Amino acid sequence: MRPEDNEARSPTAATRPSLWLTILSLSAVAVLIALGVWQVERRAWKLALIDRVEQRVHAAAQPIPARAAWPAITAAGDEYRHVSLSGRFLHDRETLVQAVTEDGPGYWVLTPLQRSDGTLVLINRGFVPSERRDASTRQGGNPDGQVEITGLLRITEPKGGFLRDNVPQHNRWYSRDVAAIAAARDLQNVAPFFVDADAGSQSGSAPIGGLTVVRFPNNHLIYALTWFALAFMLAGRLLVTFGGGLFRRSKRFVHETAGGSDASARRTGSDAGTIVEPT
């Protein structure tokens, strides 16, 4: 048997990984760690968002932004601000948007509020169950004349709800798309946002205001720990599979001729080689 044959069959050579497999494995570990770091950053952003929204929701109501500031309104800078405004409801232009609440399925009642400067703001006056969809069943909740409204500023919801598009021509609405509702109801000078009315703005028994749900899922810590755990397990597997041979003391096979000085003392078979332990 040739010495190079023995070397080719040694445990160290048998477990030596290919270059491409090593690169791909290390890249996978790096990607998993990067995903974990990204989730940690997302968690910090989400906690800051929750804190900011909590402060806005519980702050004293302030007048809605002036018309000149409307183009600059954004979700990050303005959504869920506690605002106040006054005007007169245009009940004949109301829009019902399908909703599901803790009280069951029904509709949000969005009614334009005409202000003294001629501008209109859509007010989500609250929830009505399906059996009270017709305005004639809730006349007591439709005030005439000047009203004062407080509520939360909300950003428009374009293009419909989850997997369901608004169908204005059939008066089917699944999201509070301000621009689409304004076009369908022939409304001009409409604010690009709407206001969720507080419970204190309610008149009569319906609609039921103050049902805004302010909840932000925050599972980023779990996601981060998952990615880091996967990276740790993959790195450990790579170390066991590809690096184990670096920590084991392997024996070296040396073939000596029959005439060697200690061949007769160590030879155990016909023309046997000598096992030499590494120093």
Image (cartoon, rainbow, N blue to C red):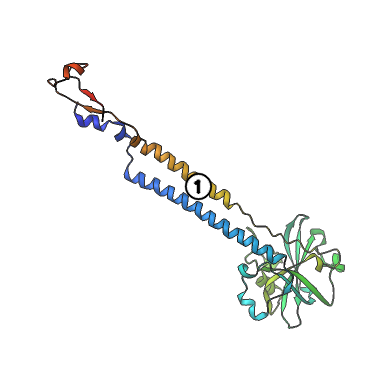
Disc 1 element: helix
* Front-lying residue, 158 or 219: 219
Q: Residue furthest left?
A: 259
Q: Position of residue 257 (x, y in %)?
A: 14, 23
* Front-lying residue, 252 or 265: 265
Q: Residue furthest bottom?
A: 117
Density class for disc 1 (Cα within 10 Å; few <14, some 14-19, many ≥20) is some
Q: Position of residue 133 (x, y in %)?
A: 80, 63
Name the image quarter holding residue 174. bottom right
Q: Name the quadrant of the N terminus.
A: top left
Q: How many marks?
A: 1
Residue that badge 1 annotates = 228
Q: Position of residue 109 (x, y in %)?
A: 76, 66
The kind of residue on which mark 1 rests is Phe
Q: Name the quadrant of the C terminus.
A: top left
Name the image quarter holding residue 64. bottom right
Q: Position of residue 233 (x, y in %)?
A: 47, 41
